[in-house]
Image (cartoon, rainbow, N blue to C red):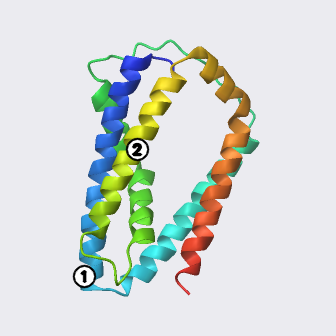
Amino acid sequence: MSCGRKTGFLVVCGVVCGALTWGTLAAVGVSALLAAKPEALVLIKIFGSIYLLYLSFKSLLKMRASHAYNRLNSNYSKHTSFLKGYGIHMSNPEAMMGWIAIISLGVNETSPELAPYYIVCGCVLIAIAIYSSYAYLFSSNMIANMYSRFDKIIEGIFASIFGFASVTLLMTVA
């Protein structure tokens, strides 16, 4: 939001490549685990549900927090923007856990062998569209200021979505 569109799009490229990396690693790991131990799917679903519940709680805390968006003018290098986006995504343990939750939501014992990879491709395409839209929209002062006014509502929506996904995933275990 504070560095302009070009830098935003370079960061988006890094974040998307990080998502592709984590997604592929999760797909390979989950696929290998399920091939060796199909009953492990129950544990993955429980862990994914707990993680989604954690995200819901975190969003609720953000919603309750009182803070104002501060538009900074940083010296974000355009040459390292891609690497910063990639590094931010790869160093975020929540990204890996999120991918495990996503893969476990879409894979079951009867899924085709390539199902995890279809999920990764679909999610990466969605990520490109969403993150590029964010970079475009949030690089304008008007949108950044508007976002600042509605951040509590947005966090409340995220809390609801994550909570619903957690309960839905947990219900598939029973």
Position of 148 with respect to 26 (left or right) is right
* Alpha carbon distance from label 1 to label 2: 28 Å
Q: Secondary structure at mark 2?
A: helix
Which quarter of the picture shows residue 66? Answer: top right
Position of 41 with respect to 147 (left or right) is left
Q: Which is nearer the eye, 109 or 73?
A: 109
Q: Is residue 101 visible?
A: yes
Q: Amino acid at mark 1?
A: Ala
Q: Amino acid at mark 2?
A: Ala
| Residue at x 45%, y 17% (from the top left corner) | 3
| Residue at x 28%, y 42% (from the top left corner) | 17
Q: Is residue 31 above or below residue 74?
A: below
Say which mark, if any, is on residue 21: none
Q: Nearer the viewer, mark 1 or mark 2?
A: 2
Q: Position of residue 103 (x, y in %)?
A: 38, 66
Q: Which residue is mark 2?
A: 127
Q: Position of residue 150 (x, y in %)?
A: 72, 33
Position of 94 with respect to 29 (left or right) is right
| Residue at x 28%, y 31% (from the top left corner) | 83
| Residue at x 37%, y 26% (from the top left corner) | 9
Q: Which residue is mark 1?
A: 35
Q: Position of residue 128 (x, y in %)?
A: 37, 40
Graded by Cα atoms within 10 Å as few (under 14), some (14 to 19) or many (20 or more), the crowding at tag 1 reads few
